[in-house]
Image (cartoon, rainbow, N blue to C red):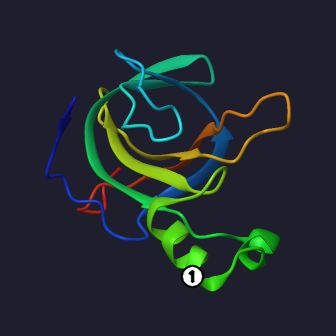
Amino acid sequence: MRTNQVSIKQGSVKHFIAEPVTVLFHNPPPITKKPPCPDGFMWHGDTLKIQFCLAEWKDFSRKGRMAKNMQPQHARAASQRGSWGVGRFYFDVRTHDGRFFRLYYDRAPRDAADRSGQWFLLAELMNGDGST
């Protein structure tokens, strides 16, 4: 997979999906809570290969009651590098069939028995020229 210079405009969501997906890696990430862009994902029975990673970013901000349970000096550090179970890794991708999607990995554990995070397909995006 390569990074490409196709433009995705801010707020150019074709439609929201917000569904859990299974992601695929040629080589599993060494640290599962700090994943790189996946090589593909499975959604509604289809396997979509990721051709390009167009953008990626992290959000370690604390939300809800988690935003109030940390001293300010620790909260500043945690917003830079994250803390256990807090944070999301976002990826805007182009698939092999020419479609554009936004995926994210949520580091929050599902429950006490399953402490791993979960991948979501957030939205299908429009191309930078307004086409799909």
> Against 33, is 66 above or below?
below
Q: Which residue is at 15% across, 45% downward?
A: 4
> Against 72, is 67 above or below?
above
Could you say where residue 123 lies in the image, as x and y percent from the top left?
53, 51
Which quarter of the picture shows residue 68?
A: bottom right
Could you say where residue 120 lies in the image, as x and y percent from the top left?
60, 41
Q: Specify whether 7 is left or right of 25.
A: left
Q: Specify whether 66 is left or right of 44.
A: right
Q: Mark 1, residues whose alpha carbon is within 10 Å: few (<14), some, or many (≥20)? A: few
Q: Which residue is at 37% across, 37% downward?
A: 36
Which quarter of the picture shows residue 62?
A: bottom right
Which quarter of the picture shows residue 72?
A: bottom right
Could you say where residue 20 lies in the image, as x and y percent from the top left?
66, 36
| Residue that numbered label 1 is attached to | 73
The kind of residue tagged 1 is: Gln
Q: Residue furthest right?
A: 112
Q: Specify whether 69 is left or right of 96.
A: right
Q: Which residue is at 78% across, 29% downward?
A: 114
Q: Nearer the viewer, residue 129 or 17?
A: 17
Which quadrant is home to the N terminus? Answer: top left
Q: Which residue is at 61% across, 31% downward?
A: 21
Secondary structure of the residue carrying numbered label 1: helix
